[in-house]
Amino acid sequence: MRTRHLILTCALLAAVAAGWMAMTSEAAAAGAHGPGRTDAPLDAPPAAPAPAPVHASKLAQNLAGRPADEPRYRSPMHVCASADGQRAFVVCQGTDSVAVLDTAQRKVVAEIAVGAHPTAAVLSADERLLYVTCTHDYTVDVVDLEAKQVAKRLPVGFEPIGIASSPDGSRLCAVNALADSISIFDLATGERRDVAVGRRPRYVADNGDQLVVGNAESRDVSIVDPRTGRVVETRSLDRAAQLREVVCTDDGRYAVVATLVGHDEMITTQMDRGWINSNGIAVLDLRQRGHFVIVLLDRVLSGATNPWGLAISADQRRLYVTLAGIHQVAIVDLPALLALVETTTAEQVQRLSQDVEILEQRRIAVRVDAGGLGPRGVAVADARGELLVAHCFTDAVAVLDPTTGALLATIPIGPQPAMSLWREGELRFNDGRICFENWLSCASCHEENGTMDSLNWDLINDGMGNPKNAKSLHNGMFEPPAMWSGVRKDQDAGTMAGQRFLGFLPDQRVQAALMEFLGRPPRAPNPHRNADPELLRRGEQVFLRARCDVCHVPPAYTDLKMHDVGLRGFTSRVDFRARFDTPSLIDCYRTAPYLHDGRAPTLLSLFTEHNDGNGHGLTRGLSPIELDELVVFLRSL
């Protein structure tokens, strides 16, 4: 703590000098026009915009996403086991399928086709059905395990990810990440109820009386009464970030959430001891309103990059956490963990969330090799005395001893194609081993698919004391320069600098792989393109009439220039410059919050609350209907 405060003090003093230098260079760059002037005033007569200087083939390649000729990797994301442990069901995202394992024979005995981009699954109470979230089809597929085929498809909201059933098997809950909602099904009647929750929810647990939903980007959990569909509490988790799986203890009292701790309040001047990101679990006593304790799984000299999957043994003695970026599993003494949580006072919560030594010192947790690359889902086959871990980048399930973590067997999921350069880039992007002491990976701030975590980070590449919102990397290849301040010439330079930021000299092989991955990012289908064509046409007309296309020039929807649109400074934030890079609007439907400092939580608020000077198009005179039409069009890009 003392080291952190000392460095912060020095950093703030240095920020004064950095700010003066940046403001001086900004004024020089503005030239005779003075600071804050764009090339053409907004009240000038409309002029036909010049085509954006974007290489057409590079744009087309980027928008096409993952190369069509890539091998079909299974990419196991989730695993669940039958009560007797004889069967396991592995959700294979890369092949849109579920692999059925015979755990005794250590082999795949069936593969069942499901919808697009499956992510998670849960068994019915009688184990005759498997419910699978199909993220890109916006459905829950109901798989008849005897017939080995999808028997029914349940429509849900946009991009369902997590799924859970009630302990008695009467209820199902799917989490709709892009819709910021959950869908609750009464399995007896088929009735569905949608409930709005926090921002970008991903996973859920059902303890019988409550649904606990982890909201990845609003840094909180929504606690929902499943009978009424009412959010009874939105519980802040302070600096938790990128919340992943959620699990509840058998008595329903505690919920555990896999999470990062994002120290976006700090200037990013050092990597060690979790200064930027640390990794752990949040434990919530559901009987105490507002209660949470974050406990880190890091060690002093080794981060526990990107906690993901969770499972609890049937005897409630052990909690298992997959550490996806460091390719390990944490085996946690659950009673000892809960004893620590129960004795942690409100005054000690923040200090505990920064303690990277506590679990190792007290021998509460051990970290073991996960037996593969990219461990995501985990399940306990208690009847067999085995732990099953799904490895995204090894296309296999590792069988571990649940007590010692020793590797007992590896079960390949289908053929094992050689790793392409693109696939290696995906692995490297999610890999904490390319970071000094493994504290974070690229995915720690940019999600596993290269988008963003919605937080404002004070990167020191353009001075200190001026935090800016993390940008999605999806459009970086065709919209140079990189960074809001344009301090990197292009994505290649930005990625090279990213390697240095992670603490090592840039590696050419890693660079080539990352650039291949980012050049063809794994784009999800845009559901907003299915809007009413007439509504889209009217929205495009508003876009043109408001002259949004002067800076956001089709087809890339950027002019690749720096502009001052009146954004400098907001509340207590300090900006050393007034001009910022014009971002592409492609995929803006999923990149909230907006503007360089994330001040606008929605596209509509951008125009109604943060456009007094018409810097974002001539929208101040638009009617509410016209604004809604404009937003519909923007979401479709």
Image (tube, rainbow, N blue to C red):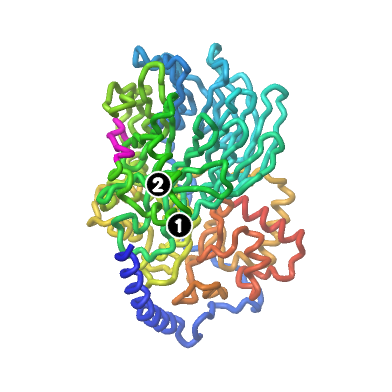
- Label 2 sits on residue: 295
State which region is magenta. 363-373
Total count of labels: 2
- Secondary structure found at label 1: helix
**Left-right relation of 119 to 269:** right
Q: Residue at the bottom extreme?
A: 32
| Sequence-first disc among 1 and 2 | 2
- Secondary structure found at label 2: strand
Q: Is residue 370 magenta?
A: yes
- Between 306 and 62, which is closer to the camera in this rendering? 306
Query: Which residue does the image show at 29% across and 21% down from the upper left?
Result: 409
The crowding category of the residue bearing disc 1, from other C-alpha atoms within 10 Å (few below 14, some 14 to 19, many at least 20), is: few
- Label 1 sits on residue: 347
**Left-right relation of 43 to 599:** right
Query: Which residue does the image show at 40% across and 35% down from the upper left?
Result: 334
| On screen, residue 621 above or below 117 | below
- Between 625 and 443, which is closer to the camera in this rendering? 443
How far is disc 1 from disc 2 in space, using C-alphas? 15 Å
Q: x, y (%) of residue 505?
A: 22, 57
